[in-house]
Amino acid sequence: MIKRINISNNLQGVLLALIAVVLWSGNFIISRKVSTQISPVSLAFYRWLTASIVLIPFAWKPFAIEYRIAKKHWKIFFWLSLTGIALFNTFVYIAGHYTSAINMALIGTTSSPIFATAMAVIFLKERLGIYRIAGIFICIMGILLLLSKGSWAVLAAFHFSTGDLWILAGAFSFAIYNVLISKKPSEMSSLSFLFILFTLGTLMLFPFYLIEQNMSGLTHTQWDSVLISSIIYIGLGASVFAFWCWNIAIKKIGTGSTVLFGNLIVVFSTLEAVVLLGEEITTIHILSGVIVIIGLIIANIKTKKY
């Protein structure tokens, strides 16, 4: 009976992590697609404001009950909101003004799992088994294959642009979030937890949103159906639902295993870029995607304990 429960929990964690990365992969596409219509801080602010408003009718009652718990653990909420909400996606949206959607997904998904796994080992004392190490190595090889387009010369000549550095900073912020999320108060419900994070993140962004609105030289928001639907998507799907799935996945299968699924974002983002942005998909894209998936499977093999 215990083995069946463990298998069920692992399967649920895997499915939830997959749902989250599918939803998040669209975030890179949107950040690139609407980059000429809205400034980055404004896009981030509207995203988290939308997410906070959507959660109010569902999270208000549990929040009212659990407010004292949140107040007691205010430090962890502050850092989670800062790294996972205010900084991470804002950096992604800034990067969208300088580099391609696929490049953002590539760099973000390559570095964030490595950052998070290293932090989990150092600060959470998580152990890396032989399968985890092999899986991480294979995932990195798959991403490097895609990054190099199958050519050592291309890989050797690769350099980080301004946009690449912004997405790298975002990946580091999200890695910190993935490690800190394990400190979530166990007695707090997921709804009120997310509501607090999204609301705090929105409040953190608000003064910078005002500054951005009053800065000369920035493109004023050009509202249309595409921008409105994009904000709804990233506010509801890529925020409320994706974060809810991701946090539960971390609880079920652990930080180290969950963050590896972030490598699949580049696969989904590439497919979406082909369909929505008209970018070309090649044999290298397909092969690297297969390698990443194999790496994920190997990394999540559970070793028997005797």
Image: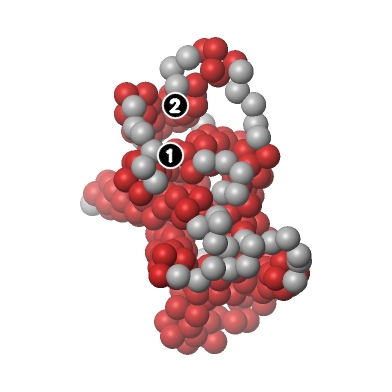
Above/below status of 237 relative to 3? below
Secondary structure category for the residue under label 2: helix
* Residue ID for mark 1: 266
Above/below status of 207 relative to 152? below
Type of amino acid at the residue the image marks with label 1: Val
- Disc 1 crowd rating (10 Å Cα; few below 14, some 14-19, many 20+) is many
Q: Residue at x 75, y 71 (%)?
A: 214
Q: Residue at x 58, y 63 (%)?
A: 38
Question: Is 5 placed left or right of 143 in the picture?
Answer: left
Foreground: 163 or 47? 163
Residue 6 appears in the picture as rendered: no
Above/below status of 261 relative to 157? below
Type of amino acid at the residue the image marks with label 2: Leu
Foreground: 265 or 269? 269
* Residue ID for mark 2: 146
Secondary structure category for the residue under label 1: helix
Quadrant location of residue 78? Answer: bottom right
- Disc 2 crowd rating (10 Å Cα; few below 14, some 14-19, many 20+) is many
- Tell me whether circle 1 and circle 2 mark residues in contact (CB < 8 Å): yes
Foreground: 49 or 250? 49
Q: How many marks?
A: 2
Question: Is 82 placed left or right of 272 in the picture?
Answer: right
Spot occupied by residue 106 in the image (x, y as percentages of width and height): 50, 36
Q: Residue at x 41, y 52 (%)?
A: 26
Quadrant location of residue 206? Answer: bottom right
Spot occupied by residue 110 in the image (x, y as percentages of width and height): 52, 34
The colour mode here is secondary structure
Q: Which comes before the other along the chain, label 1 or label 2?
A: 2
